[in-house]
Amino acid sequence: ARIYVKGKVASLGADCVAKPMRPEHLAELSALLQA
């Protein structure tokens, strides 16, 4: 699953990995917000 968070997160869960936003992630998020 992908979880998009605006801002900073105090703590990540045990299985969570922070990754940078890439252009394809921005396009996916934009399409989700438009729907």
Image: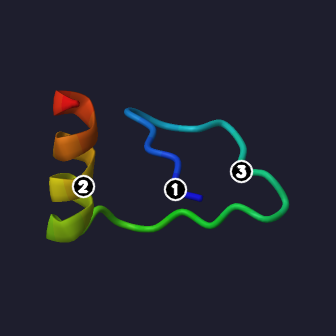
Give x and y (percent) for residue 23.
14, 67
Most distant residue in the right direction: 14
* Three-letter residue code for mark 3: Leu
How many marks do you count on the picture? 3
Q: Which residue shows up at 35% across the image and 66% down it?
A: 20
Could you classify mark 1 by the number of other residues whose Cα lies within 10 Å: few (under 14), some (14-19), or many (20 or more)? few
Quarter of the figure that contains the N terminus: bottom right
Q: Which one is closest to the eye, mark 3 or mark 2?
A: 2
Which of the two discs, 3 and 2, labels the residue nearer the N terminus?
3
For numbered disc 3, what is the local secondary structure?
loop
Query: Which mark is first along the chain, 3 or 1?
Result: 1
Q: Which residue appears farthest toward the front when viewing the image?
A: 35
Q: Residue at x 24, y 55 (%)?
A: 28
User: Which amino acid type corresponds to the residue marked 1 in the rendered image?
Assistant: Arg
Disc 1 to disc 2, how far (Cα)? 11 Å
Left or right, 2 with respect to 32, comes to: right
Q: Kindly identify which residue carries mark 3.
A: 12
* Mark 3 closeness class: few <14, some 14–19, many ≥20 residues within 10 Å: few
Which residue is tagged 2? Answer: 28
Q: Residue at x 44, y 44 (%)?
A: 4
Q: Residue 9: which quarter of the image?
A: top right
Q: Position of residue 13 (x, y in %)?
A: 79, 52
Quarter of the image that includes the C terminus: top left
Which mark is drawn over residue 2? 1
User: Vertically, is 20 above or below 3?
Assistant: below
Circle 2: is it few (<14), some (14-19), or many (20+) Cα within 10 Å?
Answer: few
